[in-house]
Image (cartoon, rainbow, N blue to C red):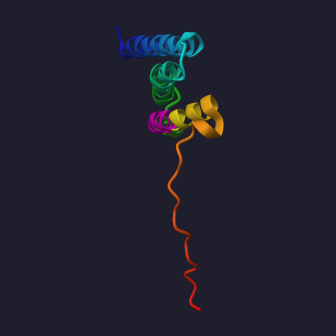
Amino acid sequence: MNIDSVLEYLMAALLLTGGFFAIVGSYGLFKLGSFEKRLHGPTKATTLGVGGILIASMLFHLFWSEAFSLRELLITLFLFITAPVSALMMMRAHPAAARAAAGGAAGRKRMRKQPACRDRGGG
């Protein structure tokens, strides 16, 4: 068994694992009930799936194209950084949106009145 065969098996395993996680994440988005449960599938499983596929693509370009593909690395890093942050922001915004949808203006918490900002111009 030479190094090419080992790399082919590694890339195939990454592609199959990535495809499996992408399908599981998409199924979770489709099938689960509440917003919180549906958000969990794409942010965890699909991120892992796309990451596995992109790593397999990086290996392919590194060993068979004889050039390191920086695009796949940047896409993977961007995906791994932005997916959890966007999920956190959506989860923080969800309770306020749910309260507003359930009770309209009466369902919202009354906000304390803030003092008006004064003009800080030099005059």
Taking depth in this image into account, of 75 and 24 the one nearest to the observer is 24
Please say whether residue 123 is one of the residues in the magenta stretch.
no
Q: Residue furthest bottom?
A: 123
Q: Report x, y in % for residue 96.
A: 54, 37
Looking at the figure, which quarter contains the N terminus? top left
Looking at the figure, which quarter contains the C terminus? bottom right
The image shows residue 107, relative to residue 5, as above or below, that is: below
Q: Report x, y in % for residue 38.
A: 53, 19
Would you say 30 lies left or right of 2 here? right
Q: Report x, y in % for residue 69.
A: 51, 36
Please say whether residue 84 is one of the residues in the magenta stretch.
yes
- Label tally: 0
Would you say 14 lies left or right of 22 here? left
Taking depth in this image into account, of 13 and 39 the one nearest to the observer is 39
Question: Is residue 69 at least partly visible in the picture?
Answer: no
Taking depth in this image into account, of 68 and 86 the one nearest to the observer is 86
Q: Report x, y in % for residue 121.
A: 58, 85
Would you say 8 lies left or right of 99 here? left
Q: Residue at x 57, y 40 (%)?
A: 108
Question: Is residue 39 at least partly visible in the picture?
Answer: yes
Q: Residue furthest top?
A: 1
Q: Residue at x 50, y 11 (%)?
A: 24
Q: Residue furthest front?
A: 106
The image shows residue 87, relative to residue 4, as above or below, that is: below
Would you say 118 lies left or right of 4 here? right
Task: Report the magenta residues as a range.
Answer: 80-92
Q: Main secondary structure of the magenta part?
A: helix
